[in-house]
Image (spheres, rainbow, N blue to C red):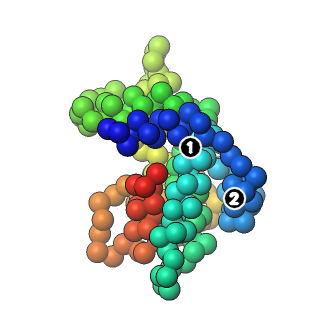
Amino acid sequence: MIRRIMQVCRALRAQITTADKLFIDKYLTAEQKKLFMQMNTHDKKHALNTAYSAEKLMTGKADINQKKLLKAALLHDIARTADEIILSDKIIFVLIRAISKNLLNYIAADNARGFLSNRRRALYICEHHAEIAANKLEELQEQEIADIVRRHHWPAQKNDSLELKLLRQADELN
């Protein structure tokens, strides 16, 4: 619970620095950058912090594709766009999911109608963000990155790539 409270505090203070912009420019193409820039500032900062953590975690590992890992880290939450997800949606998502995954699945809806339809869609996106993000990356012909992003919340498998394992660790740290 303390970790989640700290995440909210970091989200409220999130800012993108010049160094962050240079890092983004170093690893993302123009098309990828468009997707990245559609996120809220706090989600952008989370993705950057995940990438920075991944960069530290890969130190000394010879069999790692650095560019693939850092692109995946920067793009793993691109489904959470600023026009659809607000910070309170993510807070509500975490709370409802902690209470009951069945309740979350009942409330969350991709094509909801009515007064709370935007919030219900936001919950749907939060729950399915990895798949939605992977689909966006596939549209850019980024299959390898899409595969990592799609699986970053799946249970660990024996055949998981080192990039996927490190992305999971880095995401958990942030």
Residue placed under numbered mark 2 in the picture: 24
The residue nearer to you, when weighing 38 against 174, is: 174
What is the quadrant of residue 66 in the picture?
bottom right
Q: Residue at x 76, y 52 (%)?
A: 18
In which quarter of the view is residue 109 placed? top left
Tell me if I can see residue 79 in this picture: yes
Say the numbered circle drawn on residue 108.
none
- Density class for disc 1 (Cα within 10 Å; few <14, some 14-19, many ≥20) is many
State whether residue 11 is above or below residue 74. above
State whether residue 156 is above or below residue 17: below
Q: How far separated are the C-alphas under marks 1 and 2? A: 14 Å
Q: Is residue 91 above or below residue 50?
A: above
Coordinates of residue 141 in the picture (x, y in percent)? 62, 65
- How busy is the neighbourhood of tag 2: few (under 14 within 10 Å), some, or many (20 plus)? many
Q: Does the image show residue 111?
A: no
Q: Which amino acid does label 1 sit on?
A: Asp
Q: Label 2 sits on what residue type?
A: Ile
Looking at the rendered structure, the secondary structure element under dot 1 is helix
Identified at 52% across, 40% down, the residue is 10
Give the left or right position of residue 172, taking residue 70 as reference: left
User: Residue 113 at x, y = what percent?
Assistant: 46, 20
Q: Mark 1 points at which residue?
A: 43
Residue 51 x/y as whole percent: 56, 61
45, 72: nearer the viewer: 45
Residue displayed at 42% across by 31% down:
91
Apparent side of residue 96 relative to residue 23 in the rendered image (left or right): left
At x 40%, y 68%, the residue is 165
Of the numbered discs 1 and 2, the one sitting upstream in the chain is 2
- Residue 63 placed where, x, y %? 48, 84
